[in-house]
Amino acid sequence: MKKVLCIGQAAYDITLLVDNYPVENKKMRSKDRVECAGGSAFNSAYLLARFGVDTTFVGTIGNDYYGSLIEKEALEVGLHTHFHKVDSFTTTSYIITNVSCGSRTIITHKNKDAVCTSFLSQEEYDVLVLDSNEVELSLEMLQKYPKAISILDAGKYSEEVLTLGEKVNYFVCSKDFAEKFVGFSLENFESFQKAYDKIYEKFQNCVIITLEGQGSFTKTEEYELVPSISVKAVDSTGAGDIYHGAFAYFISSGYSLLDSMFYANIAGAISVTRIGSKKSQPSLEEILKVGREHAIL
């Protein structure tokens, strides 16, 4: 069985559900509240552990109540963890989800001084999933495991992403990253091509641009837009993380690039029909079932 190492952010998510986005300097009530462990790399790691993959997560939490909840949730799915614990707070994300359209706004209170500087293991890892947090440790693990399949979650434009981007096999970036990197909006197939070319010129690896409800874009022999499935979105929190975790599973299991993107699209699409990051994750069986029903490749 493949062994996966995920490095990056663990956080505790508090999601407030509203019917409309808040108006500044006004009061409103939330219709519901959902809490669970989150964080981009942690979400990917949790998904892989649920799939039965031997997965280890490395990151930072605080010696506090939220940190203990994250540890407990990792244990529930057999996710191995190496937490660097600090005597301050666990990174916390406060999420406003507009259920009328499925969009979400995330405000993260991150402990910038909490950095995981070391990870000692005698294990050999076949896959590395990184989210641009813990940059120095990520670079160290990329050097330590040069034969591992390496995947970077480039969800936002940052110097950390630029640093790690040239070191990985698969540079999987969001539409938001792509637009900031190339300096124009991605609105059609031609703009996808132009963005892909500019990103590939920089990183020289397998580039994938995730396009939310439209699917994901790459180039093999020719430019390829792998469409997603049509769903009614209620909460997009964690959808990108779930895409990355699913992509890591399928690409490391011998699926082709396009098939891996297809199933990762489905995983992300299913997740936006449910509330919460961790709680919205589909099972492997559900992804495969929906994939058979919507086979397009």
Image: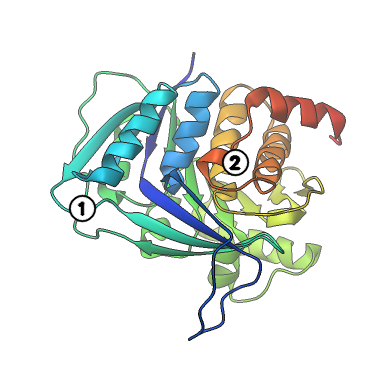
Q: Is residue 79 visible?
A: no
Which label number is shown at residue 280? 2
At label 2, counting other C-alpha atoms closer than 10 Å, the crowd grade (few under 14, some 14-19, many 20 or more) is many
Residue 241 x/y as whole percent = 53, 45
Work out whether 272 lies above or below 140.
below
Side of 81 relative to 209 (left or right):
left
Viewer-closest of 270 and 117: 270
Task: Determine if residue 33 is in view.
Answer: yes
Q: Residue at x 36, y 25 (%)?
A: 75
Spot occupied by residue 220 in the image (x, y as percentages of width and height): 72, 43
Instruction: Tell me the SS state at disc 1.
Output: loop
Q: CA distance from mark 1 to mark 2?
A: 28 Å
Q: Amino acid at mark 2?
A: Ser
Residue depicted at 31% across the width and 29% down the height: 81
Residue 274 at x, y = what percent? 65, 45
Q: Which disc, if any, is residue 114?
A: 1
Amino acid at dot 1: Ala
Q: How many marks?
A: 2
